[in-house]
Image (cartoon, grey):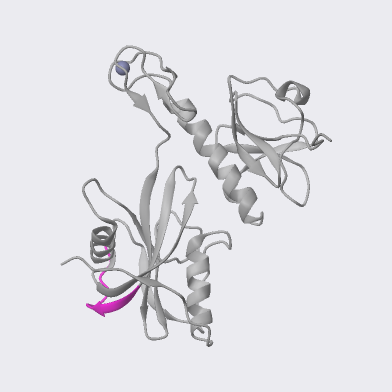
Amino acid sequence: MSDTKSPLWFAFREDQLLVLDGEQAMVPEAVSLEDLGLSTGFEREIGTLDGRQCFAVDLPPNMEPLEGAVFRDLRGLWSVDEAFFSMAGRAKQIVEWHRTHRFCGRDGTETVPGPTELAKQCPLCGLVFYPRLSPAVIVLVRRGDEVLLARSPGFPPGMYSVLAGFVEPGESIEETIMREISEEVGVEVGNIGYFGSQPWPFPNSLMIGFVADHAGGELKVDPEEIEDAGWYSVDNLPELPPKVSIARRMIEEFVAGHRGDPMTLKTIETPE
Ligand SMILES: [Zn+2]
């Protein structure tokens, strides 16, 4: 017996995903891209979702949506399930990698397919280009039954979240945690535990989540990065990030912890 389920096509026009018009976010399915009536310069198999093959597709910027479909920003698809969101995020990052690595950064020669599926290579100097990932820490700082939440200038109105920042070259994740929190809000933290991680395709972050205890210092925000920050009790929280985000999951587990269901964390060593 053959599997009759057709592949799913995660097709991007610039930053927007082609989804079927409807309540539930779903991408088009078809045996081939030609069957969908789409033409493209790039398609790549990226894994399976519910037993179906999935492909990432780069569409031209002037492409009109198919009948019965619309282009949507991934950020507008918060209500989708996690497996769909992460496959869409994987597709987005692979399409973006294809678009931004057409030429060698060292000598400008056009790249060709590289030694592995997710690699491009310069035929002149041999340099290999893999999709870029930017690791970032995201840290829930707690003080008794209060959590430290802050607003970045780019956030939707009223929304607060836990602190986050990119890992810099030469830095350990532990050092990033101490530096970011000290730079952004001027406090010290200790008793750091690992929470979990989440790929975040805006554009290519890997969010690595931690929980830490406030260990000293008063809040003093860096106005370049933070618009406002404060300690919020579990009974008085502001508007939070969307459900699909690790930030939201961390805050919800912290709140649940104060209702008798403690967070499970792995403790790490703090650098001197
Ligand atoms: Zn080169």
Is 202 on the left-hand or right-hand side of 213?
A: right
Residue at the extreme left: 272
> Residue 93: x, y in percent?
50, 38
* Image vertical order of residue 147 relative to residue 73, above or below: below
Residue at the extreme front: 1
> Residue 230: x, y in percent?
37, 75
Q: Nearer the viewer, residue 51 or 36?
A: 51
* Image vertical order of residue 151 relative to residue 251, above or below: above
Q: Ligand 1 sits in which quadrant?
A: top left
Q: Is residue 29 among the parts visible in the rendering?
A: yes
Q: Which image quadrant: the C terminus?
A: bottom left
Report the residue at 33% width, 15% height from top. Answer: 108
Which stretch did the figure color magenta? Answer: 212-222
Q: Which image quadrant: the N terminus?
A: top right
> Residue 123: x, y in percent?
36, 13
> Residue 190: x, y in percent?
26, 75
Which quarter of the picture shows residue 45?
Answer: top right
Q: Is residue 1 magenta?
A: no
Report the residue at 26% width, 48% height from top. Answer: 168
